[in-house]
Amino acid sequence: MSAHISETRVVRGACPQDCPDTCAFLYHVEDGKLVEVTGDPEHPMTRGGLCVKLKNFAEHHYNPDRLLYPMKRVGPKGSGQFERISWDAALAEIKTRWTEIIAQYGTQAIMPHAYLGHQGTLNGLTAGDAFFNRLGSTVAEKTYCESGSSTAWIMTVGPTGGLDVESLAYSKYIIVWGMNMLNTNLHAWPFILDARKKRGAKVVVIDPVRTRTAKQADWHIPIKPGTDAALALGMINVIIAEGLVDQDYVDKYTVGFDELKARAAEFPPERVEQITAIPAADIRTLAREYATSQPSAIRQGVAVERSPGGGDAIRAITCLPALVGAWRHVGGGTVEMPIWEFPFKFDFICRPDWIKPGTRVVNELDLGEALTGAMQLDPPIKSLFVYNSNPISQAPNAGQIVEGLKRDDLFTVVSELFITDTARYADILLPATMQAEQYDLMVTWGHLYVMLNQPAIPAPGECVPNIELFRRLAKTMGFDDEYWSLSDDEMLMRCYDWASPQMQGITLDLLKEKGYMRLNVGDPDKRAPHAEGGFKTPSGKCEFKSSMAANGDFVVPVWRSGYEAMQPGTPVDPVPNYIPSQEAPAANPTLAGRYPLNMVSPKPHAFLNTQYGNEPLQQRRQGEQLIVINPSDAAKRQIEHGTYVRVFNDRGSFEARAELSEDVMIGLLMTNVGHWPGHNRTGTAVNSTTPPRHANLGKAGTYSDNLVEVARA
Ligand SMILES: Nc1nc2c(c(=O)[nH]1)N[C@H]1C(S)=C(S)[C@@H](COP(=O)(O)OP(=O)(O)OC[C@H]3O[C@@H](n4cnc5c(=O)[nH]c(N)nc54)[C@H](O)[C@@H]3O)O[C@H]1N2
Ligand SMILES: Nc1nc2c(c(=O)[nH]1)N[C@H]1C(S)=C(S)[C@@H](COP(=O)(O)OP(=O)(O)OC[C@H]3O[C@@H](n4cnc5c(=O)[nH]c(N)nc54)[C@H](O)[C@@H]3O)O[C@H]1N2
Ligand SMILES: [Mo]
């Protein structure tokens, strides 16, 4: 045994998943086989620990269900019957079908659909953008995640990394706001424990559900979903009324204090109690403690954006640290995602210059409407190309997507690791590599390290990385631009601004040796990025009153085909406000009469969105699809603990096992997104019920604004 271990080759890598942690990996290879993947204990942020999802990542590569060869559909759509074909045959079929479609309907009848199955620079979110822009397809707007938060962030403080999660170790008061950190940002938690131990920090969790994280906090504040803006404005009201403002900081480094003060005056704690269900006394205590316990920190979760007023909630929350001067201190401020410190060159990565003027844009969350004709597109979508995403599980109103994918006149291509619920509807399936088999510089959105993933084992079967897939497609379609002949390293050299201050001292050669390097942005024990203002807004100040909104510019960093900072659009209130949910009982009593329960559908503990949902170990750890319901709501419906129930509304339904628990308030249901619909009893999951509407900023999804009813199955 020990002799064997000493022969093991170790290759440095990084986690591919859409998660803020992006752990440093060590691939252990023996005789050409990946025997184990461990965390690199020396990485300062991820410190060697891997989460339950990645525990058996080596075995995941050898999962017998992996898609290893191109396949062609032989049964009816959705039947999952495929037969193996060659890459040449698959590419020829795509070319023939697209050529016909383009001749009849034009290039915009083709639409890509991609999200963050993989988080690399070469193989991730934007891997196909250059290809589809060159082709002239419909531009797919990608707003599944963080687009609402990012828009709000940029309007308020600009594209700054904000507080470093590692600096949380220096905080005295930490609010984890709309995030289940122990599930979704696990490697941040040790820094909070450090702050608690060394600085006596108090940890507050604001979440409608008493989650694992909430149970570990010093104070859990349950809040009605979609009402965070009211809470933040209520806190601002108290902070101003009680003279807890850092007036010197506000005078020097902010704009719009008077307007914010006027807005907050509309939100006295007693009114906020009515909206949020948080007692007024608690709102006062929270505001006082937050303002006076410096350094105070806020870790914002993505869930806050998943309601109609989510964007304004993030804006109001992002105003708080400037108001109390928290930014002055190491460990003070707030973190959305530090990704803004990375000097991407999206113009090169996505080639927006290849988009022909007038090309239409269709949002990916509207996929069902786009495919079924509900959206009246001219030309209609005749071909859908899916990679890095699983919309039948993850996009809202999934029933309509299934209906669309059944269309016989729709030519669907899916590039995947597995035959997912979405892939079952493909006409052509293309096999993709897994992380130990490919090379990439990873995008990270929870810390400040550049991470290189190097291949440790050869690709099995005929799997290819996404970047190679698009090179092959470009060649097939006859594109002869230089772009398609660049090597991976030549690409990476152009994807980042290596001469920028953040990248000083960082080179690809060094990364190949070390695996990861910290951006040159200061150390976590010294870094206070906005101690003296320096915000990246047009005014250089923290904008309580947004100049972008005041100018009528609608900020949309929606990762569509390149990062577009500004785009004309719907006017936005320059000062953050509370925008009620559309399916809140008060807003829609008729609907609430029929569907009285609001369902939130956050992330699963043991799956990464849908990934690992097909692995037995993770299935055991996650358990089956549960719906958590308050015992009093259950009693009204004669629902007993452990029985199966149907969750439904006009959009659709799914079945789950009922868990009766006071962890959810009366009127609230909690279930996890990520269970494969096909593994559930009805072949459907949570997103068969969710609304395809967008939040007020960044066209974010509104998964938390969802009224349903439950009944015994
Ligand atoms: N284990 C695991 N980790 C993951 C993922 C995964 O699938 N599994 N996915 C990754 C991805 S893509 C993302 S975006 C992140 C997201 O991670 P988080 O930011 O943690 O988001 P969620 O898990 O969606 O929700 C977090 C909490 O917000 C609460 N919540 C829901 N609506 C509201 C609201 O209106 N207001 C407030 N205050 N709270 C609300 C939910 O009850 C939930 O407990 O996690 C990443 N990490
Ligand atoms: N109800 C509800 N719905 C939600 C959310 C919610 O909180 N509630 N959260 C939303 C959020 S935050 C997000 S980020 C989205 C996530 O939505 P998706 O990004 O669609 O989620 P995944 O399940 O990770 O699907 C990614 C797919 O890509 C495949 N894949 C992985 N690596 C590769 C690769 O290298 N190449 C190719 N071609 N394919 C690969 C995986 O096998 C997987 O099937 O879901 C959104 N949906
Ligand atoms: Mo996400």
Image (cartoon, rainbow, N blue to C red):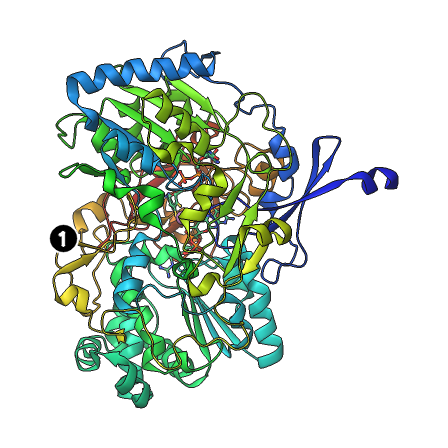
Q: Is residue 309 above or below residue 163?
A: above
Identify the residue shown where x is 17% and y is 23%: 106
Q: Is residue 122 above or below residue 182?
A: above
Residue 314 appears in view: yes
Q: Quadrant of the N terminus?
A: top right
Q: How many numbered discs, if any?
A: 1
Q: Nearer the viewer, residue 213 or 443?
A: 443
In the rendered image, residue 72, in percent from the top left (x then y), is placed at 42, 13
Q: Nearer the viewer, residue 32 or 17?
A: 32
Identify the residue shown where x is 22% and y is 68%: 576
Q: Is residue 590 above or below residue 521?
A: above
**Which residue was labeled with disc 1?**
569
Q: Is mark 1 within 8 Å of ligand 2?
A: no
Residue 670 appears in view: no
Give the quadrant of residue 113: top left
Identify the residue shown where x is 48% and y is 54%: 20
In the rendered image, residue 91, in percent from the top left (x then y), is placed at 39, 17
In the rendered image, residue 263, in percent from the top left (x then y), is placed at 18, 75
- Left or right: where 468 falls relative to 473: right
In the rendered image, residue 375, in percent from the top left (x then y), is placed at 15, 33
Give the quadrant of residue 112: top left
Q: Quadrant of the C terminus?
A: top left
Q: Is residue 95 above or below residue 682?
A: above
